[in-house]
Image (cartoon, rainbow, N blue to C red):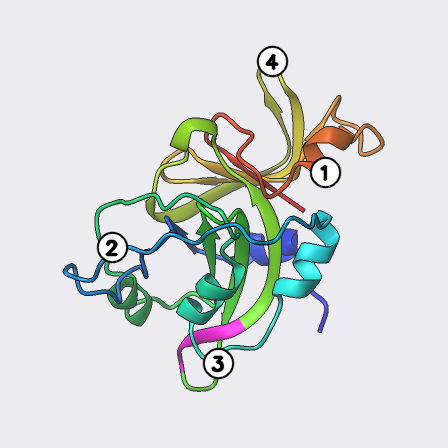
Amino acid sequence: MKIKLSTIVLITVLIIIAIVGGTKLGHQNEDTPQQTVENTDNSETTPRETSKNNVTQTSSSNQVTQETTKKGSTPIISEKLDVDEVLSNSNADYFIYIELGGGTITVYGKSVSGKYDEVIKSSPASVGLDQSTPAGIFYLKGRKEWMEIEGEGFVRYATMSDHDVSISSALYETDDGNTLIRKSYLGLGQPATGGNIYTV
C-alpha cells in the first residue's frame, strides 16, 4: 500500500519528536551508560536511497531507532519522555517519530495488536540547526498547502504542531511546485532549519 506522507500527516493527531543518540526513549534505565557511535562508513547516500534502506517491518520503534541512527551522529541528551504511556492512551491511527540526532522521520501505523509497530514510511528529515527543534510530544493542529518561511522561501504541505513546529516539504523559491530549491532537497537528513522539520 503506497501512502503519501502528506496524506498521513492530515489524519495524524499525534507526533512524537524524540531525541536519539545513545538514548532509547522511554525504555532505558537512567543508570545505563550512554553510547557514541563512531563513523566508519565514508559512503554517501541520496535521500531517496536512505528512505528505501530505512523502511522495514519491525516489532518496535526502538529497533527502527537503532537501525536508522546515522553513524557519527552526536548523542543529544534530553529529559526522559514516557512515550509508551502516551501511545497506550492514544486513539490515533498513526504517529510520527522524528529522530533529531539521526535525521529521519518514521510514520508508524497501529497493528492488529493495538500497538504502533507497523512502519508505514521512513524518510530523511532536516531539523533545526544548533538543536533548535525541541524534543517532546506534540499534537498536530493544522495544515497549510503553502507556507512562507521568512527569508528562506516557501514550504509545501506544512502541518503545524501545538508547539509551533511545522513538518513540511523542503524549500521552494515561490509557492509554485516547479521551484523546488535543489540544495534544500539534497540536504535532507542534515540539520538545516530554524527549528521546523523538512522532509519529502
The N terminus is located in which quarter? bottom right
Element under disc 4: loop
Callout 2: few (<14), some (14-19), or many (20+) C-alpha neighbours within 10 Å? some
CA gap between label 3 and label 1 equals 33 Å
Residue 132 appears anywhere in the view: no
User: Which SS class for mark 1?
Assistant: helix
Residue pointed to by mark 3? 111
Q: Are circles 1 and 2 on residues that touch, CB within 8 Å?
A: no
Q: Main secondary structure of the magenta part?
A: strand
Residue linked to disc 4: 151
Q: Foreground residue, 134 or 178?
A: 134
The residues bearing labels 1 and 2 have C-alpha atoms spaced at a distance of 32 Å
Magenta stretch in the rendered image: 114-118
Front in this rendered view, residue 176 or 124: 124
Q: Earlier in the sequence, mark 1 or mark 2?
A: 2
User: Foreground mark, 3 or 2?
Assistant: 2
Task: Please tell me which of labels 3 and 1 falls first in the chain.
Answer: 3
Q: Position of residue 92 (x, y in %)?
A: 42, 65
Q: Position of residue 117 (x, y in %)?
A: 46, 75
Amino acid type, callout 3: Ser
Q: Earlier in the sequence, mark 3 or mark 4?
A: 3
Q: Nearer the viewer, mark 1 or mark 2?
A: 1
Residue highlighted by disc 2: 81
User: Dot 1 corresponds to which residue?
Assistant: 186
The residues bearing labels 2 and 4 have C-alpha atoms spaced at a distance of 34 Å
